[in-house]
Amino acid sequence: MISSRQKNLVAAWKTDDAESKVPERSVLDPDALYDICIAEQNTLAALSADDLCYKCDEGCISPYSLVLMARLFLIDEDFADVSTLPQLISCDDLRSLWTPSVQEQFTSALDICVNWSVKLATSDGFNGTITIQDTTISVSNPCPLPIKFRPTLVDDAYPTSAENLVRYTTSYFATKKGNNDLEAMYENSENNKYDRSDNDMLAGVYDTTDEDFYDFYSDAIVGRDMTLAIGSAGVTALAMLFPTVSIFDYCVVGGCFFPFCNFTGIFVVFALGADDVFVAVDKWKNARNELPSGTTEQVAALALPDAAYSMLLTSLTTAVAFFGTAICP
């Protein structure tokens, strides 16, 4: 389901103090697990509505994440049908059952799985067997978790962390991999249909395991930048048209009367208006990126003052430039 170089939708989560020198929060805390659980639930609903995920009888297959591991750990038995886990242990149940003692037991089990993965990854030629003289001993995987453990569930600092804090983790979704499916998921992500759990404790971001969203974004931003550049060039050419004609008429034709010079001001106003529109749209997009789950009022409160200040500076610099041109001989 999550083989390397596949195109599964993946969510990467981090705690709010993940980049702090002394982090205190962990993804294994009850509230953090609850937030990820709710986010996965909402994202699965969005994927199911657009038929972008692989399904069982109960709906989309549960994502591979610490939430799945925690649910299996709480059941404490071999469980074949993971698609029914959300019905057996809801997000609210997960938070209430995740007591400090359960969290400590799960962390101990996670330590074993992580250390075994590090051993396999860092020992040259180690394949699960130890040879002593002529005797070969097979070492079975000691990880007590009921399904295969992948190191992407924890961050690279976890094995050496004395506090056993998981600052970063991932959720892998069993999603379809056609180009149209990937593009639909990208559009949904851009339109904030996938829950990022943007709260004070946890934040997430979506992409595929093959970074397809990055490619889609690059293609889109190049097209927008080219359109903006061409539009700006057109406005600039329009603004320069009448001054150029005036100079040509005065220097070449020898004309002395320029009744249309004042008319140039109209096009200057048009140019400033177009620039103000570009500034306002850009500030709004930046504010929306900073507040992906914010209301329209919150985005406007962040974007409009900054946009107004930028518009004022643009208008003032243009006015000073034209005033300087007017008073110079």
Image (spheres, rainbow, N blue to C red):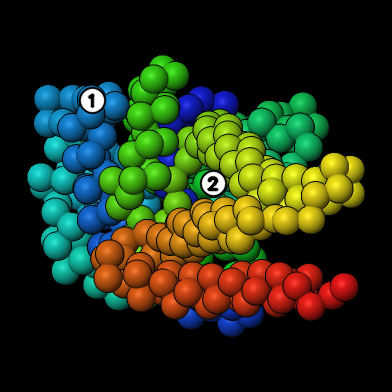
Query: How packed is label 1: few (under 14 Cα within 10 Å), some, or many (20 or more)?
Result: some
Q: Residue at x 59, y 72 (%)?
A: 315
Using the image, determine if residue 26 lies above or below residue 22: above
Residue 329 located left or right of residue 217: right
- Give the mark nearer the N terminus: 2 vs 1: 1
Q: Marks 2 and 1, how far apart in space?
A: 29 Å
Q: Residue at x 41, y 36 (%)?
A: 186
SS assignment at label 2: helix
Residue 107, image x and y in percent? 42, 63
Most foreground residue, 229 or 95:
229
Residue 217, image x and y in percent? 54, 39
Q: Is residue 1 visible?
A: no
Give the quadrant of the N terminus: top left
| Amino acid at dot 1 | Asp
| Amino acid at dot 2 | Pro
SS assignment at label 1: loop
Most foreground residue, 225 or 33:
225
Query: How packed is label 2: few (under 14 Cα within 10 Å), some, or many (20 or more)?
Result: some
Question: What label sits on residue 51 in the rendered view?
Answer: 1
Question: What label sits on residue 151 in the rendered view?
Answer: 2
Residue 216 located left or right of residue 126: left
Question: What label sits on residue 248 in the rendered view?
Answer: none
Residue 182, image x and y in percent? 42, 27
Q: Residue at x 43, y 41 (%)?
A: 10
| Residue 214 placement: quadrant | top right
Residue 135, image x and y in percent? 71, 29
Most foreground residue, 160 or 183:
183
